Amino acid sequence: MAEKKLKREKGFYSISAVSKMFSVHQQTIRLYEKEGLIQPKRSDGNTRMFGEEDIDKLEEIIHLTHQLGINLAGVEMILQLHKKIKKMQDEMNKVFAQTQQELQQETTARKALIQNYSMQLQEKKQNTAQNNLQKTASSSENVTFKDWDIDYES
């Protein structure tokens, strides 16, 4: 990819504007189209109209051929590999997003489960404390004072 992208306005460009933009002959651009490296849109009058995506791809092709000296077959392979890599990245991003969503759902479910167990534990603790209190209270009611011998000194 070119290190410095050209500044350009959004829209569609004619082949003459694109050839001036990149300082390449129109015939070179037509060759790239003939080889299937670019597919510019056509106007009603069958004029080639290059959009932003076409310009970006053309910029990459020109960089590979002119600056790096790669032939058109090599450029085609590189572009195909770029396409495959992008597809794989998109698939990986989908897998990561799905995994993250599943993890978030699992986390939410686990938090709810922990909260439920915590509430049950608190209820058991309160019930146990109440039972112990009741046992203590009932056992103190049953205390009898038997056989108290009191010796009084005369």
Image (spheres, rainbow, N blue to C red):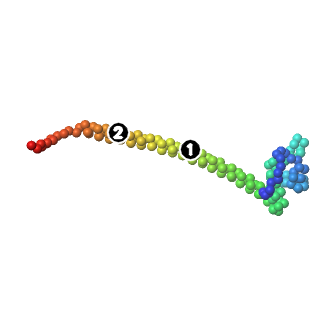
Mark 1 or mark 2, whichever is nearer to me: 2
- Is residue 51 visible in the rendered image? The answer is no
Q: Nearer the viewer, residue 61 or 110?
A: 110
Q: Quadrant of the N terminus?
A: bottom right
Give the residue type at disc 1: Gln
Q: Residue at x 82, y 51 (%)?
A: 7
Q: Quadrant of the C terminus?
A: top left
- Is residue 90 visible in the rendered image? The answer is yes
> How many angstroms separate mark 1 from mark 2 (CA)?
37 Å
- State whether residue 125 is above or below residue 88: above
Give the residue type at disc 2: Gln
Residue 117 spot, x, y in % from top left? 45, 43
Q: Nearer the viewer, residue 52 or 128?
A: 128
Q: Secondary structure at mark 1?
A: helix
Q: Residue at x 74, y 53 (%)?
A: 83
> Counting other residues with Cα less than 10 Å from the Cα at mark 1, is it few (<14), some (14-19), or many (20 or more)?
few
Question: Picture quarter containing residue 24?
Answer: bottom right
Residue 120 spot, x, y in % from top left? 43, 41
Residue receiving disc 2: 130
Residue receiving disc 1: 105
Q: Secondary structure at mark 2?
A: helix
Residue 71 spot, x, y in % from top left? 82, 61
Q: Residue at x 79, y 60 (%)?
A: 74
Q: Residue at x 65, y 51 (%)?
A: 92
Residue 114 spot, x, y in % from top left? 48, 44
